[in-house]
Structures are given as C-alpha cells and as structure tokens.
Image (cartoon, rainbow, N blue to C red):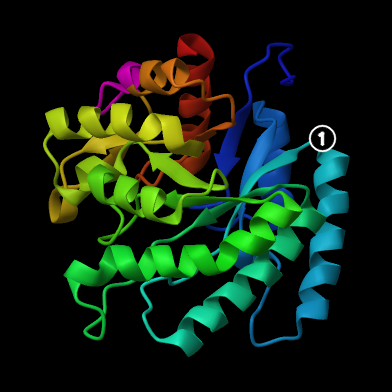
Amino acid sequence: MSKDGSDMKLGVIHYNFPGYSMEDFLSYSEETGFGHVELQIGDVWDEERPLAEAEEAARSLREDLDRHGLGVSALAARNDFVQLERDAIHHEAERMKSVCGLADILGTEVIRTEGGRPKDSVPEERWVEAVSGCLKACVPFIEENGFYLAVDNHGLVTNDGERQVEIFEEVGSDHVGANMDIMNYRWFGHPLDTVYRFYELIAPYTFHVHMKDGYGSRKDYVCTPLGEGELDVERAISELKRAGYDGVWCVEFEGREDPAVGYRKGLLYLKEHL
C-alpha cells in the first residue's frame, strides 16, 4: 500500500538528480510521496572493485531504504547482451548472477535489463539471436531464484515492439519480459500510431514501466513532465491495466526543468489518472 493510503505503487527512477546525494534522493522520494525507487547498478557496484564491497554497499543502502520506508521497484543492470561469442555470453551471464545477488540484498526481484549496444561484430539481422542467447544463458538461475529480467525498449537494439516479442518468444521463459518506457518508442522515431500499437503488443510481457512523456525523436526529442507532451499517457495506462500489470508505476524525467519539480508533476499525474 502506498503512502497516501491507496493501492497505487508509485516509484521514481534514480536518474537526472544532479547535485543530489543518495541521502538527498531518498529523502526527496519519501517526502514527495513515492513509495518505491528504481536504482542503478552503479549505485552500489564499482566493477573495478571486489564484489564483496558492493554487497556491503547494498546492505548499507538497504538500511537507508528501510529507514525512509522505500521499496526498490527494480535494479538497472547496465548489461550488453548483443553478443554472439561463447566467452562473451558466459561473461554477461556470470555478471548478471552478481547483479541478481545485489538485487536480492536490496529487496527486489526485478532487473531492468538492456538489450545492448550495436557493434560491427553483430549484424542487425542477428540481434534477436544475440540478445535471446544471452537471456537464455541467464534463465536457469533466474528461474531457480525467482528473478525477472525486464528488457528495456532503450537505445537502438530493443526499441521495436515486434523485435522484443521475437526475443521473448525465442527465450520462452515467464521470467523474461519487458520494461516498457512509454516515451522511448517515440524517441526512436516510430510514429504515434505505431507507438500505441506497441503499447498493446508489449503490455502482456511487462514487468516494470517508465512513465515518461515528451515530444519528437532523436535530436528533436524534448522530455516533458507526464501529461505535457504528445503522448496519450492514459492510453498507455489503459493497455497496461488491461493486460493485468500490477507492478510499480515508475516516473522518469530527463527534461531541463528542475527534476524535483518534473518528478513531482509525474507523481501528481499518476495519482490523478491511475
């Protein structure tokens, strides 16, 4: 149950808070009325340092989260699954095991997972094979330990709903699905009618969401607070609810306005429209 007494699970991503310490961010989240936060793997793990140090950092952060009454909606993995070489796939799977261990300490079972970065060694026609191959390598331990990989429609590789479904169907696990960022499809350059079709297509696979609004794509993209851009945000909400989504509604804001104001506007929008 959320802080306002409703059954809405409202979250904020730890992103675009320049000048905020972690304590500042957690205090802001609690005081503004968010009940959950999405954290980044870099919040606890400097990968040039031993994993044991990250585990200790995660335990300390979990104490801070508990003190502020905040849950963790997801942990962002910053992985790169555009891999075809066996050793690279093994490396990514082993790294994901470590990420899952840190997520467990932080109290979440959802890992926001990247598709990965385009590279000359993996042609576009093999992106589905590459990403699904890495995900398959993770399936045994995520299914055994109750984790869920939410592949983000972020960047260039997984920002197409039909390609996402190809990947999910190829992997064939109920523990592999989507993080639906409702603006990213538009950022990529898809027209709005395609964006809305992707909402319907991806909603049944969705484990986590980023509620973000704006205008335009690529170099013309401008982020706005929820409800102030060109998206039909209520349509996204409707499709997710129709599909039975019951996870955290996580606000993301990457605009030029004071992020404390932008995120607060997003929270108020969701309280009014969920």
Location of the N terminus by quadrant is top right
Q: Is residue 234 magenta?
A: yes
Circle 1 SS class: loop
Q: Amino acid at mark 1?
A: Gly
Q: How many marks?
A: 1
Locate residue 93, reporting x and y percent: 57, 73
Q: Please tell me which residue lies in front, 221 or 82.
A: 82
Locate residue 158, reporting x and y percent: 31, 55
| Residue visible at 49% across and 63% down in the picture | 135
Q: Quadrant of residue 258?
A: top left
Label 1: few (<14), some (14–19) or many (≥20) C-alpha neighbours in 10 Å: some
- 12 horizontally vs 204: left or right: right
Locate residue 67, reporting x and y percent: 88, 42
| Residue visible at 47% across and 36% down in the picture | 206
SS majority, magenta: loop
| Residue visible at 65% across and 57% down in the picture | 142
Instruction: Judge whether 73 appears above or below 140 on screen.
Output: above
Q: Is residue 1 magenta?
A: no
Instruction: Judge whether 241 appears above or below 41 on screen.
Output: above
| Residue visible at 80% across and 46% down in the picture | 65
Is residue 242 visible in the rendered image? The answer is yes
The residue segment tinted magenta is 227-235
Instruction: Judge whether 35 appears above or below 8 on screen.
Output: below
- 146 horizontally vs 248: left or right: right
Q: Quadrant of residue 53?
A: bottom right
Is residue 225 visible in the rendered image? The answer is no
Locate residue 170, reporting x and y percent: 38, 55
Q: Quadrant of residue 80?
A: bottom left
Q: Which residue is mark 1?
A: 69
